Amino acid sequence: QVQLVESGGGLVQPGGSLRLSCVVSGLTFSSYIMKWYRRAPGKEREVVASIGVTGSNTMYSDSVEGRFTISRDNAKKTVYLQMNDLKADDTAVYYCNTRMAWTEYWGQGTQVTVSS
């Protein structure tokens, strides 16, 4: 059974930082691309960042480029999202994601609220 469990969300002031974690079980973590998505209130879900199996290939949405960093620790089966210089527009539920064959797997999400 594949499980993805996110943590690390919370309330932070504009300009602050948070680090999200996603622990994965039930699959060979080191073999799969990992992604972070978010869904803001009233908006569609969007991909924020992705990382290749070795961690050397990363991609970011234009809205977070230069502020967010995705990384992974294959030994710990964990993917991270370091978020710096947070803005009100970053307020959303953040989800980690992977795909095995034709099946998408999602975590339960972690709420990030950026507000003064």
Image (cartoon, rainbow, N blue to C red):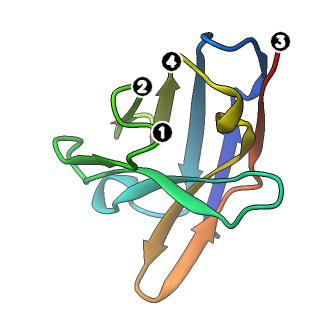
What is the CA distance from the residue labelled 2 to the residue labelled 1?
Answer: 20 Å
Image quadrant of residue 71?
top left
Relative to 33, does residue 83 appear above or below in the rendering? Answer: above
Label 3 residue SS: loop
The amino acid sitting under disc 3 is Ser
Q: Which mark is residue 84?
A: 4
Mark toward the viewer: 4 or 1: 4
Q: Residue furthest bottom?
A: 102
Mark toward the viewer: 1 or 3: 3
What is the CA distance from the residue labelled 4 to the residue labelled 2?
Answer: 5 Å
Q: Are marks 1 and 3 in contact (CB under 8 Å)?
A: no
Q: Which mark is residue 67?
A: 2
The amino acid sitting under disc 4 is Asn
Relative to 108, does residue 21 appear above or below in the rendering? Answer: above
Q: Residue at x 36, y 36 (%)?
A: 65
Give the x, y percent position of residue 6.
67, 42
Task: Name the residue carrying label 1.
Answer: 78
Q: Which mark is residue 8?
A: none
Relative to 83, does residue 44 appear above or below in the rendering? Answer: below
Q: Are marks 4 and 2 in contact (CB under 8 Å)?
A: yes
What is the CA distance from the residue labelled 3 to the residue labelled 2?
Answer: 19 Å
Task: Name the residue carrying label 3.
Answer: 116
Residue neighbourhood size for the residue with mark 2, other residues' Cα within 10 Å, grouped as few (<14), some (14–19), many (≥20): few
Is residue 4 shown left or right of residue 83? right
Q: Are marks 3 and 4 in contact (CB under 8 Å)?
A: no
Mark toward the viewer: 3 or 4: 3
The amino acid sitting under disc 2 is Arg
